[in-house]
Amino acid sequence: MKMGWDFRTGIRRSLTAWKSWDDPCPGDFIFGIEFAPQLNTLPEAHIWNGTSKFYRTGSWFGLSFSSREHLTWIEADQSWGLELSVPREADKCDTYGICGSNANCMINDNPICQCLIGFKPKSLDTWNRMDWSYGCVRNTTQSCEHKDKDVFVKLSGLKLPDTSRSWMAENLNLEECRTICLSNCSCMAYSNSDTRGNGSGCVIWYGDLMDIRTLSNNGQDLFIRVSNSEPGPGLIIGRSKRDDSRVRALIVGAVIGGVSVILLLGYCICKRGSK
């Protein structure tokens, strides 16, 4: 069965769980593919509990979803064998958004939730009581006037953020992706949209980053925007030397073009006056 949007028919297909094992009435849990083609977002599989997100597989990055349910057919028993069930009871990081916004869930750490570099708990009191629902906010307020001075920090091995507030372009590389992110005050992070080979494409996140976690394998790189005053390893300058030379070339070209137009107009006026 095809899940998600059928672009040919316009039908959106999802699976609704039974109310109980012996009651086939529609229950609260729904499994479906979230994808907004008009916004160029990446496909993600979600489990909903009513109107609230309960679990997210992670985005489709060219090979597979970063985590998923897996059943194997056992011929001898004529039954399905469960290999993976989500969310896993022993893994609190499987629960959607358990650390709130702009935080990373690390199942092997104590506490499991840590604010991203450049961020601090929004409510320190509740955070210290292991209630991470308020999430994290920036250490310093961003100013659009100085957005070109921001830098990026690279985090690796992650289940990338919820892509419901993102934008994707398959024809851009990471350097171009960084430049576009830097030019928009609302851009919080960027990454490759396809992890095959050396990686390709561009995906950009706007607003708060939700449901990030560290994975034991198959994690992706995420470049998070921070103020240039933030100390820390792995900082990447916001504007590359190539970008600077490109900007300088555009400025020089514009100046030369403007001067040429003025000289040409002056010549035409003088010639017309001499007649």
Image (cartoon, grey):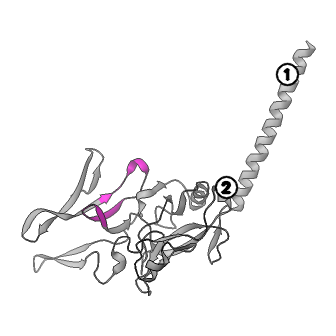
Q: Residue at the spot x=46%, y=57% of the render? A: 166
Left or right of 138, for residue 104: left
Residue 146, image x, y percentages:
68, 58
Q: Quadrant of the C terminus?
A: top right
Residue at horizontal 20%, vertical 61%? Answer: 15
Q: Is residue 36 magenta?
A: yes
Under tag 1, what secondary structure? helix
The answer to which of marks 1 and 2 sits earlier in the sequence is 2
Above or below, 91 relative to 236: below
Amino acid type indicated by mark 1: Cys
Q: Nearer the viewer, residue 94 or 73?
A: 94
Q: Residue furthest top?
A: 275
Query: In the rendered view of the protein, which quadrant contains the N terminus?
Result: bottom left
Q: Amino acid at mark 2?
A: Glu
| Mark 1 lies on residue | 268
- Outermost residue, right side: 274
Q: Which residues are magenta?
A: 33-53
Residue at screen point 47% across, 54% down = 167
Figure check: 202 above or below 257: below
Above or below residue 2? Residue 265 is above
Residue at image location 77% in from the left, 43% down from the top: 253
Tell me if 185 is positioned left or right of 97 in this view: right
Residue 78 in view in this figure: yes
* Residue designated by label 2: 145
- Which of the 4 image quadrants contains residue 75? bottom left
Depth order, front residue of 8/23: 23
Q: Looking at the picture, how far across and down is residue 169, in whole percent? A: 49, 53
What number of labels is visible?
A: 2
User: Would you call the spot at circle 2 few (<14 residues within 10 Å), some (14-19), or many (20 or more)?
Assistant: few
Seen in the image, is 105 located left or right of residue 231?
Answer: left
